[in-house]
Image (cartoon, rainbow, N blue to C red):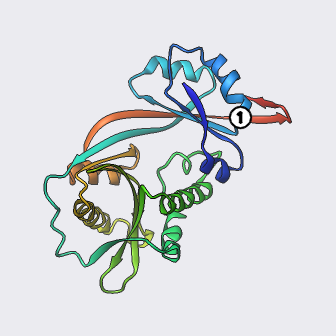
Amino acid sequence: MRAELNQIDSYVLGGPVVEIQDFDPAVDFHQFEQASVLPLRPRYASLRLPAEDVASIRSLESQGFRFAEFQLQLRHRMKLRPEVKGYPYRFEVVTEEAGLDPVLELAADIFAHDRITTDPMLGPELSGRRYQAYVRKSFADPQEHVFVMRSLESEEVVSFATIRRTGPDEARLLIGGVSNEFKASGLGVIHDYVGLATYFDMGIRDIHTSVSAINLPIMNLEVGHLGFKVVRSWLVMHKHYEIIGPDQVHP
């Protein structure tokens, strides 16, 4: 079990954000927190547990952690390239920094179901800034890509997606979505089909992603229509800390 600073979240939230990795129920969490978390002077800490590990969840609740998000881990193995000839849109990789502008504009306010947006102590403004930071990170990271989907007729950017290559034929879908203008219009289905066809052309066959279980439109789309399978369920827990002095943090 280890505590790691998330540099992007720390910058956006204005204080150290700690991610607790490889949670071990056999370790005395109070001692771990005192020795490894509090010295980082966190504003916020989070960790992810298997949803079925109720004993560990209860134990962390006694340490001040609270429910933040229920996630489902999804996987899709593509055997055939989706047929997208009839869709008047194209996916393209953003290769110039100026091309990020419409993506950043979308990332600022299209997300509504993530644990930052729904947290009363954080909220949608911070969430938007956080997603913008992760878009910039994907643009700079050689293992990640930022895509936009454009209308063939108007050249307007109507959606975006970011992915990380995780193997020769594997990738993880990170973040993405369609413009608020086109939500509930069916464009999300087109976005995913055109995206999957693009990834197939890149040699990607095995796709992983995680989604918030309250994001019912995405759940219905990816599981109900696109063939994604649920492979794991997770509970994300978090804890807010109060800095009470130059050398003290109140858990």
**Is the residue 243 above or below the residue 76 in the image?**
above
Depth check: give the residue in front, 173 or 229: 173
Mark 1 belongs to which amino acid? Answer: Leu
Q: Is residue 211 left or right of residue 224?
A: right
What is the x, y in percent for residue 22?
A: 49, 27
Q: Quadrant of the C terminus?
A: top right
Asked where in the image residue 154 lies, by quadrant, the reply is bottom left
List the single residue furthest toward the right. 246
The foreground one among 60 and 134 is 134
- Tell me if mark 1 has few (under 14), some (14-19) or many (20+) residues whose alpha carbon lies within 10 angstroms of its own: some
- Can residue 84 be seen here? The reply is yes
Identify the residue at horizontal 41%, vertical 33% (top origin): 234
x then y, percent, for residue 51: 40, 28
Residue at the location (34% across, 53% down)? 218
Q: Residue 34: x percent and y percent?
A: 70, 22
Q: Note whether residue 109 is visible.
A: no
Residue 90's x, y, as percent?
29, 75
> Quarter of the image containing the N terminus?
top right
Q: Residue at x 36, y 40 (%)?
A: 72
Q: Within the image, what quadrant is residue 29 found in?
A: top right
Q: Residue 36, relative to residue 213: is it above or below? A: above
Asked if residue 145 lies left or right of residue 219, the reply is: right
Residue at the disc numbered 1? 40
Q: Which of 131 and 143 is in front in this view?
A: 143
Q: Is mark 1 on a helix, strand or loop?
A: helix
**Count of marks overlaid on the render:** 1
Q: Is residue 199 left or right of residue 48?
A: left
